[in-house]
Image (spheres, helix red, strand yellow):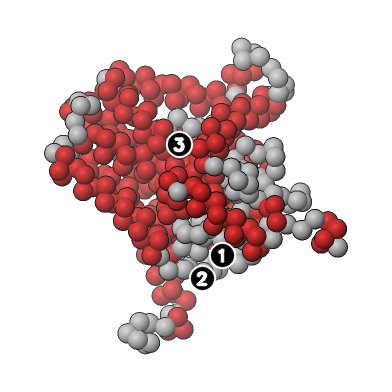
Amino acid sequence: MIGGATAESDFTPFSREVALRKEHLLCFVLPLAVLAFFATAPHPWYLALPWLLVLVANVVADVCSHAERRQPPLTLPGWPFDGVLYVLVGLQLVNVYLLVRMVALGGVWRLDVPVACLLMGVTSAYSGIVVGHELIHRPRRHMQLLGRALFCTVLYEHFFTEHIRGHHRRVGTEEDPATAHYGETAFRFLLRTVPAQFRSAWRLEARRLGDEYMRPWDRRFLRSRVVHGLVVEAALLLTILACCGRGALVVFVLQVVLAVQFLEVVNYFEHWGLVRTGKRVRTIDAWDTDSWFTYYSLVGLSRHADHHMLAARPHQELRFLEGSPKLPYGYFATAVLAMFRNRRFRELMTAELRRRSLGPFAPTAGEAA
């Protein structure tokens, strides 16, 4: 024992694995807090507002988080972590149902509805979409379908096609709409990337079906995964409208807008200013963070460089890579910085690029020689 704490060397391999598994349960905090909010609704305004402290606490914990640079044990079993993903899928679907039910029963003109919308938008992004991202990379078909279902809850199912077959192949290049350019602001990136990613997904599916420039009424589009996603999303919207009313539909769409914004802010800083120079994706082609809080609350998403090295690697097996550029904070705090203090964000990111000689500061071929 050192200073009342157990030294790293005191852990047996088994006890370390148990400790790591417990830390991964941190991903339940946000969706369970939102579930508790819906379970105790309706709330008067003075009891609804304190629930937003859950979001503040996430940012504060991220800023104060210590570093997590340990590598995952080689003997770590996969089934407990798959079970965590399945439970998170269930929580997201239940929370979406409880949101529209809350508005359907109590009406939209309640002061706790904006709080519910904000909480749901954040958990849809950082619990729903992040989990969906993990699932669509898995080789098993039923896990991919669950991931696509989660993206339907934010009306963003085309992300499945664009991300897997577009972004991972073109990351760090001019052709990738999900790579933010050096100096680009978050607002400009959002305006550019959202429509561009949909167009890219549409063309990728058209190309798969035989003709990248086929007309939208071509019968081959009946086999398009993007069209399938649009049909499911339209059916979801009509179901909410028919069963819960217009107010519930408006609130649902508002949480979608928030969730997509938070998702794309993450996309914004994950590759900001980086330029890929080779055919293969390298360690230096994605931003990482060593934030302990981000790693365990966002199912390993923070080890993004290793994810791009081998996209099918499960989140609990992702490695910490020292050679990747490092974000100024964890994902929660960096997202707030990118949205509300974007100039400061760009200054910090530029300093890291300059320190590592990446992006616009990479040496030219003559200098390298």
Inspect this view and state whether residue 21 appears. no
Mark nearer the N terminus (1 vs 2): 2
Q: Which residue is mark 1?
A: 320
Mark nearer the N terminus (2 vs 3): 2
Q: What residue sits 23% from the left and 26% below the top? A: 108
Marks 1 and 2, Cα distance to the nearest angstrom? 7 Å
Kind of residue at badge 1: Phe
**SS at mark 1?**
loop
Inspect this view and state whether residue 210 appears. yes
Left or right of residue 122: residue 359: right
**Would you call the spot at circle 2 few (<14 residues within 10 Å), some (14-19), or many (20 or more)?**
few
Q: Which residue is mark 3?
A: 260
CB contact under 8 Å: marks 2 and 3: no
Kind of residue at badge 3: Val
Q: What residue sits 68% from the left and 53% below the top? A: 359
**SS at mark 2?**
loop
> Above or below — where is 92 with respect to 18?
above
Kind of residue at badge 2: Arg
x and y percent of residue 66 in the render?
Answer: 43, 69
Q: Nearer the viewer, residue 219 or 166?
A: 166
Quadrant assignment for the C terminus: bottom right
Marks 2 and 3, Cα distance to the nearest angstrom? 31 Å
> Of tags 3 and 1, which is closer to the observer?
3
CB contact under 8 Å: marks 1 and 2: yes
Marks 3 and 1, Cα distance to the nearest angstrom? 27 Å
> Of tags 2 and 3, which is closer to the observer?
3
Q: Which residue is mark 2?
A: 70
Q: Nearer the viewer, residue 18 or 3?
A: 3
Quadrant assignment for the N terminus: bottom left
